[in-house]
Image: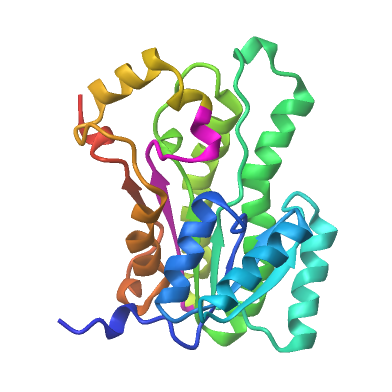
Amino acid sequence: MSTALFDLSGRTALVTGSSRGLGRAIAEGMAKAGARLIINGVDPARVETAVAEFRAAGHKADGAAFDVTDEAAIVATFERFDREGIAVDILVNNAGIQRRKPLVEFTTDEWRKVIETNLTSAFVIGREAAKRMIPRKRGKIVNIGSLGSELARPTIAPYTAAKGGIRNLTRSMAVEWAQSGIQANAIGPGYMLTDMNEALMSNPDFNNWLMSRIPSKRWGKPDELVGAAIFLASEASNYVNGQIIYVDGGMLAAM
């Protein structure tokens, strides 16, 4: 079978939170599929380093360092793209944080920080991207959800609320923008080997519980999200809209 449907050559992809972690893995996969990458992170030095590494590997890459909770910085970044003739064809809303404590101990400020980083940022950046995609009549938006888009666990209530919101924000984007040739979908990663999950990985009780729940009997690797990301960013998914693909080793399928 031809792989032309999955070719991202000539497309520009902005992946938020791509200077490390899951975002970095997704960005590397898209670059290998031919896309020009815009690397994002809050730390300019880390972004510059990532861009240099992408270029050294033979990929096209530029940087856009901004905090995804800073609306003014987001708007200014897209205005800069306009001036420089950069058209974002693919947006991956990946940036996120985690905070763990009992729900009754969360302060309102802590709650808002998680919601603004994990959910509101996807709305603001998605809105700015869509404003440019709609006149061009094409665009791909991939939001990063979670198992928390469907299920809850103790101590991560703001994260679960945000990721549940990502599921329905994705649907809202699809129903409003599909007529403009835009596909908005999401990926729901399972438990992945990332810095965000370091505390869980080092907890024997949690690890034993997790292995009893996951049919695959192992943690996921960040690069195992790449296939789903390329599919949803490519022409192969042109009639897929408002969906969330879970990459979780079968965890949601198990009773």
| Image: magenta residue range | 181-198
Please give the name of the residue rendered at 34% of the width and 68% of the height, measured from the top-left corner. Answer: 231
Magenta run includes residue 94: no
* Residue 152 horizontal/vertical position (percent): 44, 24
Instruction: Please tell me in which quadrant of the rendered image residue 105 appears.
Output: top right
Please give the name of the residue rendered at 61% of the width and 28% of the height, measured from the top-left corner. Answer: 158
Magenta run includes residue 185: yes
* Residue 157 horizontal/vertical position (percent): 56, 24
Quadrant position of the C terminus in the picture? top left
**Horizontal placement of 211 versus 16: left or right?**
left
Work out whether residue 13 can be spotted.
no
Depth check: give the residue in front, 57 or 83.
57
Picture layout, residue 108 above or below residue 105: below
Please give the name of the residue rendered at 75% of the width and 83% of the height, measured from the top-left corner. Answer: 82
Quadrant position of the N terminus in the picture? bottom left
Work out whether residue 192 can be spotted.
yes
Please give the name of the residue rendered at 70% of the width and 70% of the height, measured from the top-left corner. Answer: 63
